[in-house]
């Protein structure tokens, strides 16, 4: 289209000031070259070499910018799994100035509207603009692109117009795991700008530098043909590696979702898993999350409620529901930590040296401070005299009021601040809230101190709680939690490594060690549901805290468990909390501990923390049965014995033709493997006995006498457990050796 150029630019005669004019033009261009690069060079060449007249103002007018999307960087989990990425799509751009007839406009508008599923009149309006750049639709996929290419060919053939429709690069954000870690990752808007989570917080890194289409215009302001437009190439954004581990995140989400369902939780749940030494967040869950590929879609029941509202109320209700859904509860909501906070009060008292192993605390069921109402213990009859460890294991409120009194308001306030409360943790995510404390200056009353000692009256964020807990676990160091560990450029070169930050030492290593010991003891003695995992040393504390709200006339609670493992060398700290469970129980020990246990049972082996079983645990640790088929009877018997199993041989053959349990079935140590040497004996059946209501050893003996194997599930180290269910009903006929899984629970009321 070089001919058009000549048409649009007036040639002038060469005058006496020509040299000067050329120099000033050159200077102006030199300044602009820095910004516009190649296109200016080209224009300069045309202007100067061809001797065109150019005024300063004209230069500005002759250039307009249109941005070209840069490819946004990828978000990876810590192991390089893609959590968010930008896929190529296209932008359909119209250059209506090329149209020569009304018929062409009408026909192209019709075709475009059909392919792009747009309103025909809207598209037609665009065909009337005197421009070479009108965006018709963004983010079209490759199948639509194919149709546009066909339309381009048709237009070229029928009207001999080649540039009237353009396809330009564009990108669409895509989240391969849908709702996984939604509150952490966040999402982007229609212009690819980060709106929530890491997408928002790290937007300037991810976004890249948009390219430009520079268009030369004629004096009338009409864009010039595309041949004079030049692409300034877009620069891809940087990519980000999170500290989040997709595997751990998935395990947490799986059990958190189950916890929400099992306990009819009304107001969502939170789980945070943290590396205790660095503050790196391994998993951060808010359930229910939302689909990152469809972030404006509300849960069905919420949508129904909104639809039922009057029309004029729907808009504000929708935005309120959306921001609630997007809200990262782990950092944005505050809650009363309840008894979990006794970890902090106990650590303060030990570090101040105001308590030791010989200290005793008395509980008669309640305690009165000043002229306030009596504060009750959860055990109304009272715990009597307790030492420090017993006070923690009993989760006795009056004992903790006494511990708080020994610390005193001044020291309590100092430690409260030192443990990272009263300030944001500074995690690299948007929307972190501050905690709510009695007063800014820390002038606590004796009643304030009493309730704060057992975790009421102070409203903190979950991220503050887990960070303080990590400092108790890791030798006393308060770390700064973070979710991004590395930023790399589009060539994969590291441009920033995030170093973990230790803020200060809060308690001594000795106090940390002592707390690890006490909290491990608490986990193993508190009953089957208190955080105990066979083979692993877990330290932790349950909490059941009252909220100031009520649902359906009954008081609302938060059920939580905060702990870490392994207790003798802590690596991972985790907080599990459910806001307003409305099911059978609202106790932390019943609602949150099982979820904590289930998650840790999978996460610790994944982190290659070796299980170490005590002799007692070995009695009911399950092992894989192993393969015996094809072996001689003698061979099979000796292999099974070596693996710690007993055997029963059925049939008169020499070789094992089948076995029960199956090769990969898990059976308890000392379980029985039935070896069949001919097929006729396989028809033999035994009857499943009733295994509910017994101790572990009773269950093992009944099962063995009946010819089945019992797999013990959920039994704590405490012997005070009783079987509560079995997965195959009594009376059912099964093959000998069949594994019946028997679930246990604590036989006594659990603390707190
Ligand atoms: Zn008590």
Image (cartoon, rainbow, N blue to C red):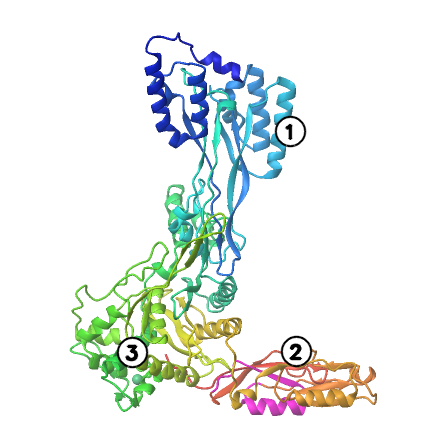
Q: Is residue 701 above or below residue 301?
A: below
Residue drawn at 42 percent across, 22 percent down = 44
- Residue 700, magenta (yes or no): yes
Q: Which residue is mark 1?
A: 150
Q: Nearer the viewer, mark 2 or mark 3?
A: 3
- The secondary element bearing badge 1 is classed as helix
Question: What is the x, y in percent for residue 322?
Answer: 41, 50
Q: Which residues are magenta?
A: 692-717
Question: What is the x, y in percent for residue 449?
Answer: 21, 74
Q: Earlier in the sequence, mark 2 or mark 1?
A: 1
Give the CA separation, mark 1 to mark 3. Answer: 73 Å
- The secondary element bearing badge 3 is classed as loop
Question: What is the x, y in percent for residue 168?
Answer: 53, 33
Give the CA separation, mark 2 to mark 3. Answer: 47 Å
Give the CA separation, mark 2 to mark 1. Answer: 59 Å
Q: Which residue is mark 3?
A: 508
Task: Determine if residue 555 is in view.
Answer: no
Question: What is the x, y in percent for residue 31?
Answer: 35, 28
Q: Mark 2: give few (<14), some (14-19) or many (20+) Cα within 10 Å.
A: some
Q: Earlier in the sequence, mark 1 or mark 3?
A: 1
Disc marking residue 313: none
Q: Which residue is mark 2?
A: 665
Q: Is residue 532 above or below residue 125?
A: below
- Residue 704, magenta (yes or no): yes
- Horizontal arrangement in the rendering, residue 618 relative to residue 459 (left or right): right
Q: Nearer the viewer, mark 1 or mark 3?
A: 3
């Amino acid at each position: 289209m070089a001919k058009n150029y000549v048409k649009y630019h007036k040639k002038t005669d060469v005058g006496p000031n020509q040299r000067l004019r050329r120099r000033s033009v050159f200077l102006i261009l030199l300044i602009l070259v820095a910004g516009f690069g190649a296109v200016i060079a080209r224009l300069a060449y045309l202007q100067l070499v061809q001797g065109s007249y150019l005024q300063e103002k004209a230069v500005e007018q002759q250039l307009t910018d249109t941005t070209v999307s840069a490819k946004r960087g990828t978000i990876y989990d810590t192991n390089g799994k893609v959590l968010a990425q930008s896929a190529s799509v296209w932008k359909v751009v119209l250059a209506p100035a090329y149209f020569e007839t009304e018929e062409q406009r009408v026909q192209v508008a019709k075709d475009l509207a059909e392919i792009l599923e747009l309103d025909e009149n809207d598209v037609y309006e665009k065909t009337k603009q005197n421009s070479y750049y009108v965006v018709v639709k963004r983010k079209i996929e490759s199948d639509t692109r194919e149709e546009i290419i066909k339309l381009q060919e048709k237009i070229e053939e029928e009207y001999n117009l080649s540039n009237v429709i353009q396809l330009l690069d564009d990108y669409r954000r895509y989240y391969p795991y849908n709702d996984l870690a939604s509150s952490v990752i966040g999402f982007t808007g229609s212009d690819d700008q980060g709106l929530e989570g890491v997408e928002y917080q790290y937007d300037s890194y991810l976004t890249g530098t948009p390219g430009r289409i520079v268009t030369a215009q004629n004096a009338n302001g009409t864009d010039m043909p595309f041949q004079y437009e030049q692409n300034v190439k877009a620069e891809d954004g940087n990519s980000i590696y999170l500290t989040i581990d997709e595997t751990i995140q998935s395990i947490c989400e799986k059990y958190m979702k189950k916890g929400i369902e099992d306990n009819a939780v009304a107001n969502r749940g939170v789980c945070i898993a943290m590396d205790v030494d660095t503050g790196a967040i391994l998993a951060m869950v808010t359930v229910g999350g939302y689909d990152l590929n469809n972030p404006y879609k509300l849960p069905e029941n919420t949508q129904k409620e909104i639809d039922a509202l009057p029309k004029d109320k729907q808009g504000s209700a929708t935005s309120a529901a959306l921001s609630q859904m997007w809200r990262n509860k782990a950092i944005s909501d505050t809650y009363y930590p309840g008894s979990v906070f006794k970890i902090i009060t106990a650590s303060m008292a030990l570090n101040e040296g105001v308590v030791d192993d010989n200290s005793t605390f008395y509980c008669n069921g309640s305690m009165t401070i000043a002229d306030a109402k009596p504060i009750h213990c959860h055990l109304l009859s009272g715990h009597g005299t307790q030492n420090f460890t017993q006070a923690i294991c009993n989760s006795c409120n009056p004992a903790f009021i006494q511990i708080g009194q020994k610390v005193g308001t001044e020291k309590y306030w100092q430690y409260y601040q030192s443990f990272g409360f009263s300030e944001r943790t500074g995690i690299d995510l948007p929307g972190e809230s501050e905690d709510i404390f009695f007063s800014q200056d820390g002038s606590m009353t004796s009643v304030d101190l009493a309730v704060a000692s057992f975790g009421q009256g102070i409203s903190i964020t979950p991220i503050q709680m887990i960070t303080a807990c990590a400092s108790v676990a890791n030798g006393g160091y308060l770390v700064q939690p973070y979710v991004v560990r590395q930023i790399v450029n589009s060539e994969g070169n590291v441009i920033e490594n995030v170093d973990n930050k230790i803020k200060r030492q809060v308690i001594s290593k000795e106090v940390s060690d002592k707390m690890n010991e006490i909290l491990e003891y608490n986990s193993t003695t508190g009953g089957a549901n208190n955080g105990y995992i066979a083979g692993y040393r877990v330290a932790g504390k349950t909490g059941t805290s009252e909220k100031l709200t009520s649902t359906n006339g009954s008081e609302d609670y938060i059920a939580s468990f905060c702990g870490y493992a392994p207790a003798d060398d802590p690596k991972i700290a985790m907080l599990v909390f459910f806001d307003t469970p409305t099911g059978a129980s609202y106790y932390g020990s019943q609602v949150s501990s099982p979820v904590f246990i289930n998650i840790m049972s999978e996460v610790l082996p994944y982190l290659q923390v070796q299980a170490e079983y005590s002799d007692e645990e070995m009695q009911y640790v399950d092992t894989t049965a192993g393969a015996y088929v094809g072996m001689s009877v003698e061979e099979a018997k000796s292999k099974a014995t070596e693996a710690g199993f007993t055997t029963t041989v059925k049939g008169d053959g020499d070789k094992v033709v089948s076995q029960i349990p199956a090769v990969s079935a898990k059976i308890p140590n000392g379980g029985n493997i039935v070896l069949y040497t001919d097929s006729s004996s396989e028809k033999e059946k035994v009857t499943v006995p009733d295994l509910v209501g017994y101790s572990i050893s009773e269950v093992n003996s009944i099962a063995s006498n009946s010819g089945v194997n019992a797999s013990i599930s959920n039994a704590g180290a405490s012997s005070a457990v009783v079987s509560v269910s079995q997965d195959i009903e009594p009376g059912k006929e099964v093959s000998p050796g069949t594994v019946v899984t028997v679930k246990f629970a604590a036989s006594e009321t659990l603390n707190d």
